[in-house]
Image (tube, rainbow, N blue to C red):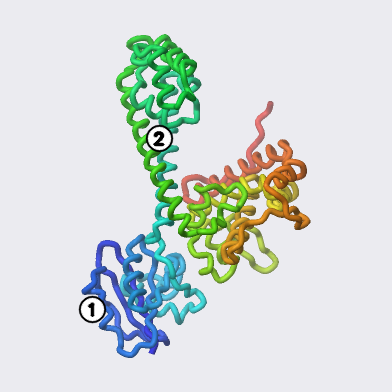
Amino acid sequence: MKIRLGIDIACRSPHHAACADETGALLWSGHRFRTSVDQLEELWARLPDGAEEVMVVMEPTRNAWVPLAGWFRRHGAVVIMVPTEQSSDLRDYLSKHTKTDRLDAEMLARLPVLHPEGLHPAEALGPGDALKRAVKIRSGLVHRRATAMQRLDSLLEILGPAWIDALGSRMTKTTFMFLARYAHPHQVKRLGQARLGRWFQHHTRRAWGPERAAAVIAAAEETIALWGDDGLDYEALAADIACEATIALEVTDQIDMLDRRIHDLYCEADPDQIALSVPGVGNVLAAQIIGRLGDPDRFTSLAAARSFSGLVPKRNASGLSDPAGGPTKRGDACLRAALFQAADRARQVDPQLAARYQRLMRDTGRHHNSATCTVAAVLLTRLVSCLRNQVPYELRDVDGRPVTTEEGRAIVRARYQIPEEIRAARRAVSRDNSAKRKRDERVKKGVAKRSKTPPVPTPA
């Protein structure tokens, strides 16, 4: 006898479980339990004796599914994770106007009979994997630092544009340390050029010195001349700048510590460093791709790996109509971002990827982002194939001849450059499409109305 155990997972309230046999007939339903050893053992004891196979079907509800999957797997059960969109559609089919946790558990218990081709065993623990979790945290920290840098840039504009010219638009740790202490123009003037120059030399290993100090002091003097002594509350503004700079500095330190830990985890996950063999992929992108991709052997095909990334186009074919839509974006967003960056770099080295990018931009009218997404899907296919076969990525010309990195970069520069007028035209089309898409979304939400008559051109 084969048992199908459907579990509707809750984060704070008790979970609901339902048990069915291999034909979909319910054996019992409505069992409530929490994620504790004694209650899990009580649930396990309710299963019929002599079961040949126990299949546990769950949805990936936040991270609450991770300890449950680990416990059931240790007890010999096969754990199946069902996408939430799929289970929601199936629940609407079975019961359109009623939704309860008990019905959800029963639907999951019957799902192996209703949709057997959609059963994919969960071999990994998702957020329980250290590398997958670490690269996600790093991605979030990078976003937080970028936000803090944008705020700092806006606050420095209040002091005057000379501050950005003196400190540079690419802010470093030294910039954060300086702004956390000396964002007051009168304080900068009191420091003097000599002391400030020595401070810059000490914290930048002599990359900055008296010249940078002179530029900062000139910026402070220009601010005082612009605002006067009482035109601006320098103390309050310096406190706000120091707050944002301290946040950016602390986040930068956390990113540096994460990078060291991620490197060690990546070396364990990819000992042959196959991901690093991809042109344009460094330590950060390699770890992010491997961490979010997981075990490449779990995919049934290379197309399944592309689908997991969300880079495949949407399809809505009917009769003779088969329009190509944009990417589904249903996969891992962190993986998709890493693949996009990797593809944008790899196309500048790999002649085959560069040729595809050129054809999409020049012949099919794609803009940069759309063409890069297509190249990213191709790059993912190649990387998964390399990981499965345990062979490094190999650069080849369009005729199949192996080339070195220097040769590939020279070939791309000589043959596959996109003229600037084509890029400008594609950017214009992209802006028009983006404006139309935003307008359609506003119309769909009911916050705007679509004009029924074309606009009347105004006379010149």
Residue 192 lies, with reference to residue 283, above or below; the image says: above
10 Å neighbourhood of mark 2: few (<14), some, or many (≥20)?
A: many
Quadrant including the C terminus: top right
Q: What residue type is labelled 1?
A: Glu
Mark 1 falls on what kind of element? helix
Say whether residue 315 is visible. no
Numbered badge on residue 272 = none
- Image quadrant where residue 423 sits: top right
Q: Which amino acid does label 2 sit on?
A: Ala
In x, y percent, where is residue 2? 39, 86
In x, y percent, where is residue 170? 49, 30
Mark 2 falls on what kind of element? helix
In x, y percent, where is residue 345? 61, 45
In x, y percent, where is residue 162? 48, 18
| Residue found at x 40% / y 80% | 110
Q: Which residue is tagged 2?
A: 148
Contact between labelled residues 1 and 2, with CB atoms less than 8 Å apart: no
Q: How far apart are marks 2 and 1 (CA)?
A: 50 Å
